[in-house]
Amino acid sequence: MKLNRSTDMALRIAMLTAPASTRTTVDELADRLDLPRSHVAKVVQRLQRLGVLVTIRGRSGGVAFAEGAEELTVGQVVRAFEGAGEVVACEESGCALRADCRLRVQLRRAQAAFLAVLDDVRLGDLAGSPAAPVLLALTARPRTP
């Protein structure tokens, strides 16, 4: 299963903000992760609604990892960003094998197994050692002009 770009961005933003003790901005996140600012802003907004991030408006505002978000799982984030769709959209393709297809059942099992593994990984686990020093170094990196 391939994750969409927004899901990938969401997980990287969560990893980058989790170990940081200070707020960061959408511009800084976009710069650090080499991602388009407009996409980062949309993903940050969705992560805020999901309870992963806290956003504060204004001059001294910014984005921070939400209290308690370390207990959320990667599976929860993936489901929130990917939706409940199947790996293959059999109804949309008009497949003649649809009525007696055995592949669809196996793909559903594989998708469930994939998500079950991700349900065992907490967001806090992604930002712990040995990744924390690397993530903190990225957060502290000076912005490029």
Image (cartoon, rainbow, N blue to C red):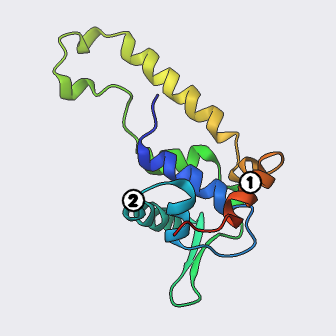
Residue at image mark 1: 124
Q: Do the residues labelled 2 and 1 touch (CB within 8 Å)?
A: no
70 horizontally vs 59: left or right: right
User: Farthest residue in the bottom direction?
Assistant: 59
User: Farthest residue in the front direction?
Assistant: 145
Residue 124 position, x and y percent, is 74, 54
Q: Residue at x 36, y 37 (%)?
A: 85
Q: Which of marks 1 and 2 precedes in the sequence?
A: 2
Picture disc at residue 37: none
Task: State whether residue 25 is above or below residue 103.
Answer: below
Q: Which residue is drawn at 61% across and 46% down?
A: 74
Dot 1: element: helix
Distance of label 2 from label 1 (alpha carbons): 24 Å
Task: State whether residue 86 is above or below residue 109.
Answer: below
- Nearest the viewer among 12 and 51 is 12
Dot 2: element: helix
90 horizontally vs 81: left or right: left
77 horizontally vs 101: left or right: right
Q: Nearer the viewer, mark 2 or mark 1?
A: 2
Instruction: Name the amino acid type tagged 1.
Output: Gly
The quarter of the picture where residue 46 lies is bottom left
Instruction: Name the amino acid type tagged 2.
Output: His
User: Farthest residue in the right direction?
Assistant: 129
The quarter of the picture where residue 89 lies is top left
Q: Which residue is drawn at 19% across and 16% down?
A: 95
Residue at image mark 2: 39
Residue 14 position, x and y percent, is 61, 57
4 horizontally vs 72: left or right: left
- Nearest the viewer among 84 and 99 is 84
